[in-house]
Structures are given as C-alpha cells and as structure tokens.
C-alpha cells in the first residue's frame, strides 16, 4: 500500500509551447502522483462540463465566515465573486452548490477558500507566499474534491496540483502533469503524466482516468486508475507527450506532440471507464 510520503520523480515531464496549451506525472508506480500532504510554503483546472463554472477574473473573508447575502441565489453569489477584483480564479458546481476560489492578498501571496452555499459557510484552505498569477483552482462537478494547480515551468510547460478533500480540507495527493488535470462530468480526474519504470529504466507518457474514493483513506485517495492512452517506451527520455485539451461527456480530446520532429496531432478517445 502506498504511503502519503512518497517522493515525486519529475523525469522528463516536458510540454513544449507547441502543444498549444491555451489556459492557465513520474513516480515508481507509473501513475504520476504522490499521496502526500504539502505544507503552506510549498508549491501548490478548469471544469469542462455544464454543471461547473470557472472564472479567472478579478472575496474577502476570514478563516471561517458566513456567505454574504442570505437571500442571494447561488448564481448571484458566483457572479459577485467573479466581479471581485481580488478573486483570481473561481470554480464552482451548480449541482453541489459548492465553490473554491483564489483570493490575492498581495503581489506575492494568496489564499484559497472553499465555500458551501447551502450551508452558508466559507473556510480558508491554505495560504501561499508566492504570486497567484500562474495558479488556478478546479472543483469536481459531482464529488468532494478540488485541485489547486500551479504552472511550474513555461516553455516547456509543466503543472503541479494539490488534490484536496472537501470533508476536511486537507491535501491527499500531489499530481505532476503535462497540461492541466481536468474533470469529466462524473467527477473522475483526467490527466497526462509520465510513466517511469526503474527496471528496465524506461520512460513512457500516458493519459489516465482516476476514480476517487467517496471518502479518502489516510494513505490512499484513488479508487482506481486506468490508463487510456500510452506513448511509446524509450530508454533515455519520453519521445511523445500528450496534452489533454478538453473532456466533453464521454470523449477525451488531446494533442500528441512528438518531441523529435515537433509534429502535433489532434486526437480523441472515448472515456469508457466504469464508475466506482
């Protein structure tokens, strides 16, 4: 069983600007994830279906506070947050009426808040002491999870995400990916990462679908991870990488980039994995 203290092996997680990522992966088990909490000083998506919303625009609050305007609708509350100048990224679910957002507190610091509109509560999740400029949040459309994502490298582009459980607002995994992780409409996580096999020392990129547990165990949050796309195995570096560009109903759209000849192909695959 995995522990929450495995270390990430970055490997060759490189996504060139040619991959066309328009918006702001490995590990010895090959899943591009680290089940481990992160401290507030460490580095920390955007929903892709009709039940979720996202805004990267521009609320004040205490560590725990009531949602403003008891008579306001959920849509009104989300519109108010979107129009607040200090809110830099907002993600919400119309189905669950929960939301998460980044509030910029200074040029080099920000806070992440999680809110439950029905319960009329809002709580501080974490504070970070770096700019919110290249960070974003993304809430599951159906389940009790959200991610806080940060761009860790530009040209090539790499992303690092913390996966949080809304029940206790604690991080249960760190994901290193090519491009941003994305949710499907059933609350599964779609991501492109790098598989590294120590023996016989090979590299391969892949797109996987994560089903998450309804309630995470102390040392495991993933119910199942299924690889749906595999790149060729190489002995020195990953030769082909993937960038998930959109998840729409039962389809995953992605770009395949050959690092040797810089050729890009737009592809798609059905997302047929059964739910847990």
Image: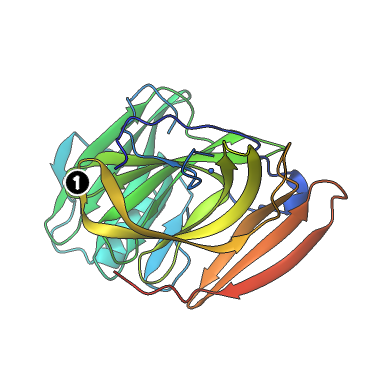
At horizontal 50% and vertical 59% (from top left) the residue drawn is: 208
**Disc 1 packing (10 Å; few <14; some 14–19; many ≥20):** many
The residue lying at 34 percent from left, 39 percent from top is 35
Location of residue 80 by image quarter: bottom left
Image position, residue 270 (x, y; %): 55, 77
Identify the residue under disc 1.
Answer: 122
> In this rendering, does residue 13 appear at all?
no
Q: As displayed, is residue 106 above or below residue 226?
A: above
Give the image location of residue 218, x and y in percent: 20, 41
Q: Quadrant of residue 246?
A: bottom right
The residue sitting at the front extreme is 200
Q: Quadrant of the N terminus?
A: top left
240 or 199, nearer to the observer:
199
Residue 97 on image: x %, y %: 24, 64
Q: Position of residue 34 (x, y in %)?
A: 40, 38
Above or below — where is 2 with respect to 95?
above
Name the secondary structure under disc 1. Answer: strand
Please indicate whether residue 104 sits to the left or right of residue 258 in the image: left
The answer to whether 163 appears left or right of 262 in the picture is: left
132 relative to 29, above or below:
above
């Amino acid at each position: 069983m995995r522990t929450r203290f495995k270390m990430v092996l970055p490997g060759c997680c490189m996504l060139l600007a040619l991959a066309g990522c328009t918006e702001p992966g490995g590990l010895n088990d090959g899943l591009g994830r680290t089940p481990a909490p992160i401290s507030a000083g460490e580095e920390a998506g955007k929903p892709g279906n009709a039940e979720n919303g996202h805004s990267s625009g521009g609320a004040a609050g205490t560590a725990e506070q009531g949602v403003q305007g008891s008579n306001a609708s959920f849509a009104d509350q989300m519109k108010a947050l979107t129009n607040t100048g200090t809110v830099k990224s907002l993600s919400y679910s119309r189905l669950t009426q929960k939301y998460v957002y980044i509030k910029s507190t200074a040029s080099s610091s920000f806070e992440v808040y999680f809110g439950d509109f029905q319960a009329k509560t809002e709580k501080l999740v974490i504070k970070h002491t770096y700019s919110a400029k290249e960070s974003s949040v993304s809430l599951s459309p159906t389940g009790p999870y959200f991610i806080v994502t940060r761009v860790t490298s530009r040209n090539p582009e790499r992303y690092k995400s913390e996966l949080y459980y809304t029940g206790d607002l604690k991080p249960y995994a760190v994901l290193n990916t090519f491009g941003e992780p994305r949710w499907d409409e059933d609350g599964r996580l779609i991501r492109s990462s790098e598989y590294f096999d120590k023996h016989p020392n090979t590299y391969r990129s892949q797109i996987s679908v994560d089903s998450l547990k309804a309630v995470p165990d102390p040392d495991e949050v993933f119910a199942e991870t299924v690889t749906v796309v595999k790149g060729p195995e190489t002995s020195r570096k990953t030769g082909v990488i993937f960038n998930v560009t959109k998840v729409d109903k039962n389809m995953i759209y992605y770009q395949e980039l050959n690092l040797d000849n810089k050729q890009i192909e737009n592809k798609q695959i059905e997302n047929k994995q059964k739910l847990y």
